[in-house]
Image (cartoon, grey):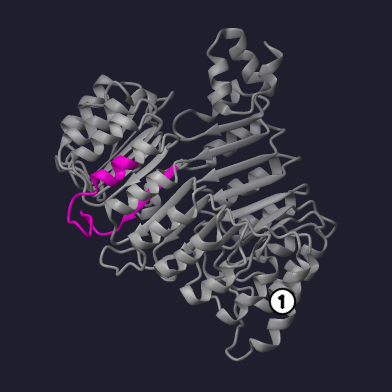
Amino acid sequence: MPESETFLTSRRDRNAVSLVCRSWYRAEAQTRRELFIGNCYAVSPRRAIDRFRCVRSLVLKGKPRFADFGLVPIGWGAHFSPWASAMAAGYSWLEKICLKRMSVTDDDLSLLALSFPFFKGLTLICCDGFSTAGLAVFAEKCRHLRLLDLIEDYFEEEEYEVVDWISKFPETTTSLETLGFDCLPSAVNFEALEALIARSPALRQLRVNHHVTVDQLRRLMVRAPQLTHLGTGSFRSPEEGEGMEHEAPLVSAFAASRSLVSLSGFREVASQFLPAIYPVCSNITFLNFSFAEITAEELKPVIRHCHNLQNFWVLDTVRDEGLQAVAATCKDLRELRVFPLDATEESEGFVSDVGLTAISEGCRKLQSILYFCQQMTNKAVLTMSKNCQELVVFRLCIMARHLPDHHTGEPMDEGFGAIVMNCKKLTRLAVSGLLTDKAFGYIGKYGKSIRTLSVAFAGNSDMGLRYVLEGCPKLQKLEIRDSPFGDPALLSGIHHYYNMRFLWMSSCKLSHRGCEDVAQRLPRLVVEVIRDRPEAEDEAVEKLYMYRSLVGRRNDAPPFVKIL
C-alpha cells in the first residue's frame, strides 16, 4: 500500500483507493479510523465491523430528512440497538459516535457506557427514544468523556420521570470539552451544573437550555471564561422587572469572555439584555438567532459590531430591513439561514426578494444560503447568481404552493436557471415556487455538480424529473414532495439509482405498479412504500423511499411499510 494512503482523510478519496485492487482494499480497511454510514439500512452492523476493525469514530444516519417535517410516520424504524450490540462486541476501542435521526433507547446508552472503556464523545442529532435516565447512566460510567452534545433531540418523559443526570458526572476533574443540552425540555440541577463547569477546565463549548436564566448564565461564564462556543438558554430574567440588577454583571461576564467566537440560544430573549453581548461581537464568527423573535431595530445595534461574522442564523422577524443591516456590515459572511416564525403556507412571511437582493449585493463571499419566504422574483435570484458565484448550497423555500415571480407573474424558471448556470460549485439545491419543466431542464443541463436536490410543489410534467435524472451525474440524494411526477418520471432514472444514496417521493403521482417495476429491475435496491395508515391499500403510492443496500430488505419494517 502506498505510504500516501495513510494520510487520506476524505472518505470519498479512501473509497476510491479501496477500489484499485484487493490489497489496497484490505489496507484501506485496516487503516480506516473514522467510519461514515449515511443510511443505517445500507449495510448490516456485522458486515461493517468485519471490514473495518480498527474504527475509533462512527457517524451513523437513520430516518430520511423529511422526518424533520413530519412526513415519516412515527415508528418507521432506524433503531440503534442492533448497532449498539454489534459494536459492543466488535469495537472495544471505539471512542466517538455521532447519530442522526436514530431511535436510541436508555439501554443503548447504558450499553455504550459499559462497553467502551475509553469512550470520549457522543453526539445525538434529531434522535428520540431516550430519557434523562439513560443520560444519567452514561454520564456516570463514561469516565473519559470529552463530548456530550444533544442537538434537536426529542424527549417524551413526564416531569416525575426526570432524573438528575448532571450530578452523575465524576466528582473529580473532568475531561469535558463540549457539553450541549439546549434541546432538553426539563430543568437541570443548576448547582450540580455549576460545580461540573468549575471542575472542567478543558470545557470550550457549552449550550444550556431555556431553564437557565441570565443570572445563572453569568455564574457559569464566570466559572468558564475560556469558553469559545456558548449557547445562552432563555436570555431573560425569570420575573418581569428584575432585569436591571442583572444587566451590568452580565456585561462584565461577556467582557471577560475574550475567547468567544460562537453564540447561540437566545430563547425567549429580552431585548434589554442584548447589549450585554456587544463586547464579544467583534470576535464572533457564528451567531444563531434562530430562536430569538427579535425585530430589525433590536438586531441592528448587535449586527453593526459583527464585522467578522461568517455564519448567521436568524428568524424572519428581522424583516428585509434587518437583512439589509447584515449586508451592510457582514462582508465576510459565508452562510446565512433565514427561518420562518410561522412555517405554514398561509403565513404572512416577513422577508422577500428585497432582503435576498441586499444580501447578494453586500455579502459576496456567501457560500451557503437557506431562505424561507412568501414572495420572490427572478431578478433577485438572478442577482444572487451573479454576485455570489462561490455558492455551494442554495435553498430557496417559497412556503406557499406554486407562487410565481410576484412582480411579473411568471414562473421562477429563469431565477433557478441562473443559479445553476452561474454557480459552478453548487452541490446542494432546493427549489420551490411556480416552476415548469424548463427549470428542471436548466438543472439537468447545468447542474453537473449537484449531489443533493430537494423539490417542493414544483414541476408540470414527468419530463421535469427526467431532465434531472438524465442530466445530473453526481446526484446522490433526491427529495420530492407534492409534485406531479409519476411512473414514467420514476422509471427514467433506472440507470442512475444504484449510484444514489436515496430517493424520496411523497404526494406525487406514483402507482404500485411503477414502484414494483423498479424493484424488479433493480434487485439490489430497497423499495419501500410507506402508508400513513396501515389499512390503506390504494393503488396510488403515498410515500416512496428507495435506497441502495448491501443486505437487502430490512427485518424491522412496521405494518405501514411495504417493501417491494
Residue on which disc 1 sits:
251
Residue at screen point 78% across, 64% down: 224
Image quarter of residue 200: bottom right
Query: From where the camera sits, is residue 72 visible?
Result: no
Question: 260 left or right of 266?
Answer: right
Above or below: residue 562 compared with residue 149: above
Query: From where the camera sits, is residue 143 visible?
Result: yes
The residue furthest right is 172
Question: 109 left or right of 120?
Answer: left
Question: 205 left or right of 467?
Answer: right
Looking at the rendered image, the quarter that the C terminus falls into is top left
Nearer-the-camera pick, 493 or 536:
493
- The 10 Å Cα crowd at callout 1, few under 14, some 14 to 19, many 20 or more, is some
Residue 558 placed where, x, y %?
Answer: 35, 43
Nearer-the-camera pick, 382 or 534:
382
Nearer-the-camera pick, 386 or 507:
386
Residue 131 placed where, x, y %?
Answer: 57, 59
Magenta region: 393-418
Above or below: residue 15 compared with residue 184: above
